[in-house]
Amino acid sequence: MNAPAPKPWIMAIAPYVPGRATTDDGRKAAKLSSNENPLGTSPKAREAFMAHAGDLERYPDAGATIVREAIAEKFGLDPARIIYGNGSDEVLHLAAGAFAGPDDEVIYVRYGFAVYEIATRRVGATPVIAPDKDYATDVDAILAAVTDRTRIVFVANPNNPTGTFAPRSEIARLHAGLPGHVLLVLDQAYAEYIDAADDDGGMELAKTATNVLVTRTFSKIHGLAAERIGWGYAHPDIVTAMHRIRLPFSITIAGQHAAVAALGDQAFVDHTREHNKRWRAWFAGEIAKLGNAGLRAIPSEANFVLVVFEGALTAETAYKGLMDAGFIVRWLPGQGLAQGLRITIGTEEETRGVAAALRALATA
Ligand code: PMP
């Protein structure tokens, strides 16, 4: 049959599998599978969104001017160096689209964020996987993987799905070891949850370096996942290249207003951060008590914890058992992580509930 042939590198892509919202048998359950904000959305952002929800007939401002200006003011940045997109997912795709292609290599860590592989293969580039160090980013392994063909290094910091964090000194070492033609993408989707207060996650580096892109999102701490608003910061030459291939109207009008209001609601951000810090520590402590059963919480600086199963109870059995108990978490065998479950820190009730359900499974 004569039919359109998808490019072979596209056929190598396994489509992104989102976190689920219902159980196998269709029950609604606590959704701890997508690292969303369990406390909801900033009330100010919701109000701004609602005020513009009826603005439907005109295209949004393609330059997302109010969002860029609010970001610039809040973080002391140059608005001309800000790129934005339909979630930071789009920004990651823009980086790959502008800086990598066939015959090029793109490095990321084993247990890296799933979109890196999709964005890399989409442009025909070759993924190169750097081994982890007990689930954490290993700068030496990344540097050892660099070749003449390397064009991009993606590092999520904190990393998803492991929650691990590389401090500023390690990121500086990585940057110093990379050739200048390699774009270092520091994916900061979970930046606001980092405990080390003086660690800006690479923003200072992006202000001065010519080969660093920092990406951020409104989906996590601001609780605006549905509106799809992400942004990045880099040297003007990098941003200009990415603008060439950007979707023209990637952020809705109501979304732009919601984002501006969200940036202005520091109280909501602080409250979310404190909630997450408290219950992340509590949850990790509960997992530590199940060490005899082979459960281990990987140290996390994000809004989720990766629990690995090294005893009789497998991650797959625990995944199914949690679902039966009304908790949907993330099991990622497709990403080579069949031995772990990534569990979002939920409300107090959800966090206590999922810990109790895990205990019941581990001690059965
Ligand atoms: N980077 C990382 C590390 C993530 O975990 C996510 C969300 N799953 C994203 C980027 C993309 O988030 P968004 O497109 O909602 O901004």
Image (tube, rainbow, N blue to C red):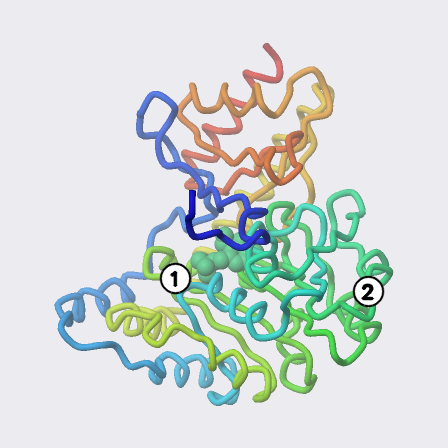
Q: Is residue 29 above or below residue 40?
A: above
Q: Position of residue 181 (x, y in %)?
A: 74, 79
Residue hosting label 1: 268
Dividing the picture into quarters, in which one does residue 293 lie? top right
The earlier-in-sequence mark between 1 and 2 is: 2
Viewer-side label of 1, 2: 2
Residue drawn 57% across and 50% down? 114
**Which residue occupies the foreground of this view, 314 or 89?**
89
Taking the image as shown, residue 56 lies to the left or right of residue 213, namely left
Residue hosting label 2: 146
Instruction: Give the structural element (helix, strand or loop) at label 2.
Output: loop
Hey, what amino acid is under mark 2?
Val
Residue drawn 59% across and 47% down? 12
Taking the image as shown, residue 30 lies to the left or right of residue 166, namely left
**Which residue occupies the foreground of this view, 98 or 202?**
98
* Other residues around mark 2 within 10 Å, as few (<14) / some (14–19) / many (≥20): many
**Residue 62 visible here:** yes
